[in-house]
Image (cartoon, grey):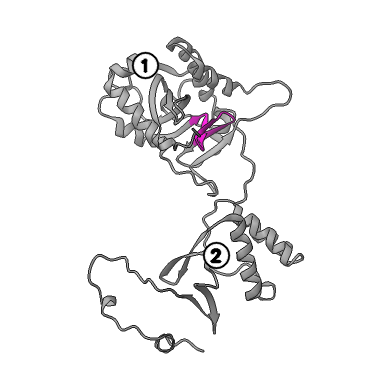
Amino acid sequence: MPLTKSIKTLDWEHLFAAIFKCSSKTSDPTEIVVADQMAIAANENLQRVLKALQRDLIFKQIYLYAKNPTTRILPFRQYPGAKPNEAQQFLDSMIAANNKEQVEAQAVKLAHRYMLTKNIQNGLLIFLISEAKLDDKTEGKCVFVFKCDFEEISQLSDEKLFRKIEDAIVEKTKKGTLYPYYADGKFDNTQVRVFDEFGETQYWLDFLDLGEPPLRIPQLQAITLSEWEQLKPNVPVKYKEKIDELAAGRSLVKKDLLAADEDRLTLKETDNLIASISDKTGKHTILLQLDQVKATVPLDEYGKTWIIAEQAGMRFILVKGYDLRMRTDMLNPLDLAARPTVKQAVAKLSIPV
């Protein structure tokens, strides 16, 4: 059976946990507790916190093309020759550990790596080794790492740590990671899923010796550019700087067309371009906003069931269809309104024709 189960629906079993107290005033972390599966199961408060932290990290959304994403997928930094990546070795050894003493040995090394990063924040550093049950009945072990920021850490101890404060710990968890990365039903030990509330990548680059991911251009943008270059070979290069600004993941609201009047496509060229792109990339929806009115439209239906028009300095979104629906659960004036013809509607809106 292929491994296709989403990480959000996997069943997890907590095997080991190691928790350290970190202070910006000291160079060494303070070990609070190292627990094995039996100890975790016997401590309801600890069990509840670990489950809450794990679930919170797993359910973080991944916006691959955001300018400063809070959740990212990063590779380990590679070194020339046979030099290994030390941080990855520690994580692999932690996953392979058979007892809490072996877990503790690797967790201490990683905790000291954390203390070498810049701008240490007071709080807890939590390592969780957890095992997932996969669709094909196999199992996969992962390491979760959480950094929970607390300004006052003097009262954080084994006895007081997890008494009804799981919500506070989750709320104060500003950083987290999952290794190996899980996607498409399988684990990938070349990548790490990291979360940083402020989108600060450098923290992870230093702590876990990660590298920057290769620049990824959204498929729709890449295919559009390729097809445009075939249609008008000498035109796209004129807009290279503007195109570069449309970098992957940036949430961009474009108020004007990118190309100047003389470089825009004809209606026929637009139809051909959209048809070719849709064949290669599948279906896409585009969110449009005209003044206060928003519409989500299927790209491949442009020129068929909807179109954007411009005349006398005004812009129009024209949509046609048969099944008109209104998202409202109560009677409203539109249920009673007249339905003018297109000609009457043009006159009503004072559209110059």
Residue to which mark 1 is pinned = 37
Relative to residue 304, is residue 291 drawn left or right?
A: left
Is 179 in front, or is 328? 328
Is the magenta region chiefly helix, strand or loop?
Answer: strand
Residue to which mark 2 is pinned = 300
x then y, percent, for residue 20? 42, 20
Is residue 219 among the parts visible in the rendering? yes
Please check the rendered image and state whether residue 185 is part of the magenta-colored stretch, yes or no: yes
- Residue displayed at 41% across by 37% down: 8
Q: What element carries label 2?
A: helix
- Residue displayed at 61% across by 30% down: 76
Magenta stretch, residue numbers: 178-194
Relative to residue 184, is residue 190 drawn left or right?
A: right
Residue type highlighted by circle 2 = Asp
Q: Which mark is first along the chain, 1 or 2?
A: 1
Spatial distance from mark 2 to mark 1, Cα to Cα?
53 Å
x then y, percent, for residue 199? 50, 42
Mark linked to residue 133: none
- Residue displayed at 40% across by 32% down: 10
x then y, percent, for residue 116? 54, 24
Residue type highlighted by circle 1 = Gln
Please check the rendered image and state whether residue 115 is part of the magenta-colored stretch, yes or no: no
- Residue displayed at 54% across by 68% down: 255
